[in-house]
Image (tube, grey):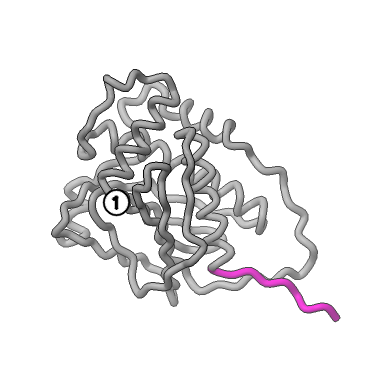
Amino acid sequence: MAAKKTKGTEDVLLILCKSVQNVLSFATKSDISFSPVVMKTTKTCLKPDIGCFVLFEGGFSGLVVMNFSAGSALEIYRNYLISMGMPEEELTANHTSDEVANSLGELMNQIVGNFQSELKNELLISVNQSQPKMIVLNQELLVAINARIDNPQYRRVSFETADNNLFYVELAVEKMEFVELLPLEKVAAVDLDTIIEEEKAKNSGKTKPDTEMADDDFMKELGL
């Protein structure tokens, strides 16, 4: 009897990394690459200059964190808005601006949407997400995120923009293994155009996207 195919944490991480790469490359019309090497860590942190995260539950429980340097945040923000026709002279040069946070929030929602779609396509697994949170951090502050995850597995992957600015994606998930009992029949994947248009439709008429800057209650939860 042939050995049953199994998938685990690294397979889920690869789906996430491809979602980040594909969405950001498509949205910014620029090259985004990620390291073929993954780092196993012992915790997940929000790090300077901008950190954002979202929780998942459903087929599995987990946490995704994205940490941007000021350079990577501004580059992605500027390329994203320029690709949509925004005049360059109207763009901010300050990474702490709400415009940068809102743009990264929109992109994170698009990444999450693509990740959910690809999980369903590749593994026939559905997950629900929390509302993404964002926080601007200074060089003196690291915030550890302790999600309620049994036997957590921590992974970190570095990404690089076209201008060689770095940002990082971290994944914390419960230890899991998916064993293929029968051959998987993949569902039709949703293309990036559809995901981005749906996100734009959700945010039309809003003063800001569903991603929120961390509020006072959230800061208290972190002990700050």
Q: Does the magenta stretch include residue 159?
A: no
Residue 192 on image: x %, y %? 57, 36
- Residue closest to the eye, 148 or 85: 85
- Residue closest to the eye, 68 or 103: 68
Q: Which residue is drawn at 36% across and 39% down?
A: 105
The quadrant in which residue 148 appears is: bottom left
Left or right: 56 as drawn, with respect to 122: left
Q: Which residue is drawn at 31% across and 49% down?
A: 68
Which stretch appears magenta? Answer: 1-9
* Residue, far bottom: 1
Q: Is residue 7 magenta?
A: yes
Q: On screen, 135 above or below 47?
A: above
Residue corresponding to mark 1: 51
- Residue closest to the eye, 69 or 62: 69
Q: Which residue is drawn at 36% across and 33% down?
A: 209
The quarter of the rendered structure image containing the C terminus is bottom left
Q: Is mark 1 on a helix, strand or loop?
A: strand
The quarter of the rendered structure image containing the N terminus is bottom right
* Residue, far front: 163
Residue 63 on image: x %, y %? 41, 60
* Residue, far right: 1
Q: Residue at x 51, y 54 (%)?
A: 17
Left or right: 110 as drawn, with respect to 50: right
Left or right: 142 as drawn, with respect to 87: left
